[in-house]
Image (cartoon, rainbow, N blue to C red):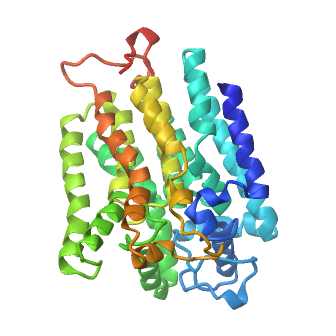
Amino acid sequence: MIAAAVGVHVVFWLSLSYGFLDPLFNDATHRLPRGLDFYAVYQKSHEFSEGQSLYTRIDTEQLVVPYSAPYFRYLPTWAWFMANTFCRLAPAPAYWLWVACCEAMLLVCLGLFLARAPSLRDRAWMAVFWLCFTPYYLELFMGQFTFMTAGLLTLSWLALDRRREWTGALWLTLSICLKHVGLVLLPPLLALRRWKAASLAVAVPALLSTLYFAANPAELRLFLDVFAYGTPNPFHAGNLGLVALIGNILRLAGRGPADPLAAIVLKAAPAAVLLWLGQLTWRHRRAENLLPLLMLWLTSYFLLGPDVYEHHYVLLLPVFAWAWLMRPSKVLVVLYLWLALPTVFVLVDLPGLPRQRFLEVENLWWRDGHHARIFVYHLWKITPAIVLFAWIPRLFVSGSGRSLRHSHSGSGSIPSPSARRSK
């Protein structure tokens, strides 16, 4: 099984050069071409190094890259890092270096979990989890930064589980400086009184961003506008979260995003998820539940986020790996395989459409009345994510329940084989 997993990963690498997997993904078909998101960040980081605005729309007439997405949607810290590292190379070599960095992080994460897996069967599943996930291929194709965020979060969780507070706080802080997804983990950290991790993760990015905006006050309004750009806009084929699904249901009922009732529902649904998460976190705020709570809150991103793209699902890789080592389950296998496969996009894409950059195929689905295509496509990823979200609380240790983990110097994330139960 390990050899097969390696073979699948080699296929990913070959497709990066030859593109035979690209028609399986909306973002590789209608958000062409390869490296688009990486080049947008490269472009803005280059402009940043020359004292230009970070958050104005990218001028396609002044590009130093072959092509670019229109906006930079990251904190100033990432532009500073890129300007002083990757921008010292030409754009194409810089993209391939970033791909290599992602592969290096993948190997680090895989190695850590192989070392913690108690049996050959477990090690085989670790290889499958980390090497066969098609959203990771899409991540590499786009030159995105979500997987590196997931890798930094993995290192943070490992350190926090072993009660290495400052190390865990450092990795978490770096992940947020790269991409702010990690902020969703603050509630469980606060509930468990992991003050160092929570405070450092907020203070450092906030301080560095404040210094930038204090020196460039006009940038703050642009920054806020860019982060509001396109959100919440559930009506595009790239958006595969719960908010997008609800938005399309409302649209079928004749209520677009400008409709007051639709706006209320699109805010109420995530609010209801947050309320449920809050009470569950409060009831299970035990040190032994650190990892399950972190897994639960990271998975909640797909239910809460207004913009959830297919490549974002790489955030679930550490969730699957940790969950398997804590409680091997056929449910996890089914959910992983479901999420690891591409969406049904290749089956629902309209025939004869040009491979055009930023072609919004979902508008064409609505125009032509292909409602079934829309809902089958949007349900494909979020359905297993919701099931995983509902399954994770099985990992909680209650006051009267039996622990799934054995004791060691940390909170004990990995159970002895005899203590683990298969469901």
- For the C terminus, the image quarter is top left
Q: Residue furthest bottom?
A: 61
Name the residue nearer the viewer: 224 or 107: 107
Q: Residue at x 54, y 16 (%)?
A: 118
- For the N terminus, the image quarter is top right
> Is 108 drawn above or below residue 19 in the view shown?
above
| Residue 21 shows in this picture | yes
Give percent across and percent down for residue 201.
43, 53
Give percent across and percent down for residue 174.
54, 53
Q: Residue at x 24, y 77 (%)?
A: 254
> Is 339 drawn above or below residue 411 in the view shown?
below
Give percent across and percent down for residue 417.
46, 12
300 left or right, relative to 160: left
How many labels, in total? 0
> Is 264 drawn above or below residue 138 in the view shown?
below
Q: Residue at x 37, y 16 (%)?
A: 421
| Residue 157 shows in this picture | no
Name the residue nearer the viewer: 107 or 21: 21
117 left or right, relative to 413: right
Name the residue nearer the viewer: 85 or 33: 33
Q: Quadrant of residue 130?
A: top right
Q: Residue furthest top?
A: 418
> Is 157 drawn above or below residue 269 in the view shown?
above
Give percent across and percent down for residue 342.
55, 50
Name the residue nearer the viewer: 76 or 377: 377
